[in-house]
Image (cartoon, rainbow, N blue to C red):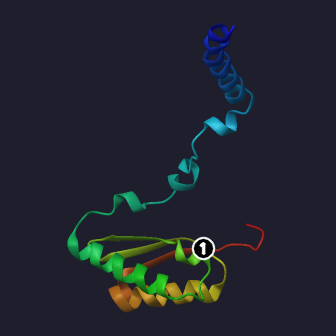
Amino acid sequence: MKSMLSRLVLPVGALTFWGLMTAFPVLSQAPDNTKNNKDQTTTADQQKMDPSDRAITQKIRKSIHDDKSLSTYAHNVKIITQNGKVTLRGPVRTVDEKNSIHSRAAAVAGEDNVTDELQVASASQ
């Protein structure tokens, strides 16, 4: 009886898992930001590994991260640096956060080298 039961456990478990994955397909799909990224010209994965560009990004990121008054949204904005030009992208909670992040980036890279694509998110997001 025990060996028969142990031979059934794996197939029944696999069948149950398959049934759950087909019943709840959302669980088996990876998140996809393709629609959000289609219209954007630069994305974070396009940043080159140039030491000076990485240093600029790192200084801006540290400045943002060290400010505990900023929201989680602000702490997670995208900072893309290519050839000394910085693009800021992502949602923030307030206009003050948007201005704060922009000024931090401008202090590191220079005002003319910052493209601000930050968006103020509504409270419901």
Vertical position of residue 87 compared to residue 110: above or below: above
Q: Quadrant of the C terminus?
A: bottom right
Q: Quadrant of residue 11?
A: top right
Percent x, y of residue 77 = 51, 72
Amino acid type for the residue under numbered disc 1: Tyr
Count of residue discs: 1
- Residue 17, given in percent of the width and then of the height, sits at 66, 26
Tell me where residue 87 appears, x and y as whole percent: 42, 73
Q: Secondary structure at mark 1?
A: helix
Which quadrant of the rendered structure holds the N terminus?
top right
- Side (left or right) of 105 relative to 94: left
Residue drawn at x 57%, y 42% as measured from the top left: 30
Which quadrant of the figure has residue 25? top right
Determine which residue is flagged by label 1.
Answer: 73
Q: Is residue 96 above or below residue 6?
A: below
Residue 44 in which image quadrant: bottom left
Residue 42 seen in the current view: no
Q: Position of residue 29 (x, y in %)?
A: 60, 38
- Residue drawn at x 66%, y 39% is 27
